[in-house]
Image (spheres, rainbow, N blue to C red):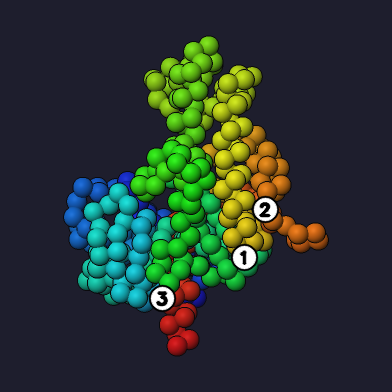
Amino acid sequence: MAYFVGIDLGGTNIKAGVVSESGELLNKLSIKTNAERSMEEIITDMGKLAKDAIADAGISESDVSAIGIGSPGTPDNKAGTLVYATNLPFVNAPMRKIIHDVIDLPVYIDNDANCAAMAESVSGAAADVADSVTITIGTGIGCGVIINNRIFSGFNQAGSEFGHTVLVTGGQQCSCGRKGCFEAYSSASALARMTGEAANANPESKLNDLIAANDGKLNAKIAFEAMRLDDQVAKDVVDTYIEYLSDGLANVINAFMPEVLLIGGGVCNEGDPLLLPLREKTMNKPFFGPGVRKTEIRLAKMGNDAGIVGAAMMGKACFDDKLQG
């Protein structure tokens, strides 16, 4: 049996594990990224963690066919570099070369959102279909597109950035420099911002009590918690948030018409209070003609393992392509 190592590079932690060719995660290890260090130090540690993961799995390096890496930012798989990485000191980082100095295995790189989508396609909530899109709702909005069981990322591996398509012209400032982006209205950060604005405008709202109980810190859970306490202001916040999110998801559906659209991230832990109205609002918006099959919206299920498994499976796909010529 062939094995693959998946490395999930994040701004806080680097995670790695060994994955079977069928997508089964055998083990996982994690170390701190310490992102203030040089890119050479961070990438060298990624190679060392890959070696440790192989040893921890009880196999030898000769049993491993390739290493796949999922990273924020934009890779250049042909050159083996990471062109840039959000929140990390990487510019044209020679990732393949540095890792080869530590461990002599083929190395392939892709965006972390693409890898999460690949994990869901191989082992997760979209394993039964060939065409899916995974939207990850976190600090930002991640998007990974799978077409015919393969990652789609454009000619330059920088595609699928649906978080930075505009929902509201001239709207909220987005981290990308534009205004009114999907991310600025539908990320967990956006929901926290809307919660704070509503709390400030409505001193009597239970939102303020919950924010105070959380040491004055805002997060994406507070509006849902206050809604469960029958707070009308919170209900309005959640309803507005879901409306924006449904607009963005409808745009994704119109663009790709995936058989399955997955949503993941911490906000999705709210379950039915989020999912049920989101499905209802979203499915009224795409351009489905009479008799046309409709996309199904599901919750992603790979969770924290998605980055490792997806990176490994992306590495497998690239390795298989190379074998085939």
Residue 71 vs residue 195: left or right? left
Residue 299 drawn at (x, y percent): 61, 48
The amino acid sitting under disc 1 is: Asp
Q: Disc 2 vs disc 1: Cβ atoms closer than 8 Å?
A: no
The mark found on residue 286 in the picture is 2
Rendering coords of residue 84 (x, y %): 29, 59
Q: What label does residue 279 carry, if any?
A: none
Three-letter residue code for mark 3 = Ser
Q: Residue furthest front?
A: 170
Instruction: Please tell me which of labels 1 and 3 falls first in the chain.
Output: 3
Q: Where does residue 235 sit, x and y in percent of width and height?
A: 61, 25
Q: Is residue 77 above or below residue 195?
A: below
Q: Amino acid at mark 2?
A: Pro
Between circles 2 and 1, the one closer to the viewer is 2
**Residue that badge 3 annotates:** 65
Q: Residue at x 39, y 40 (%)?
A: 173
Crowd rating for badge 2 (residues with CA inside 10 Å; few <14, some 14–19, many 20+): some
Mark 2 and mark 3: span between their CA atoms? 42 Å
User: Quarter-wise, where is residue 212 in the image?
Assistant: top left
User: Which is nearer the eye, 312 or 212?
Assistant: 212
- The answer to whether residue 191 is seen in the rendering is yes
Residue of label 1: 131
Q: Quadrant of residue 133?
A: bottom right
The residue tagged with tag 1: helix, strand or loop?
loop
Mark 2–mark 1 distance (CA, rounded to whole Å)? 17 Å
> How many C-alpha atoms fall within 10 Å of the one at disc 1: few (<14), some, or many (≥20)?
many
Q: Nearer the viewer, mark 1 or mark 3?
A: 1
Q: Nearer the viewer, mark 2 or mark 3?
A: 2
Residue 229 lies, with reference to residue 166, above or below; the image says above
Instruction: Assess disc 3: are there few (<14), some (14-19) or many (≥20) residues with their C-alpha within 10 Å of its C-alpha.
Output: some
Q: In which quadrant will I find the C terminus?
A: bottom left
| Percent of width and height locating residue 55 | 35, 64
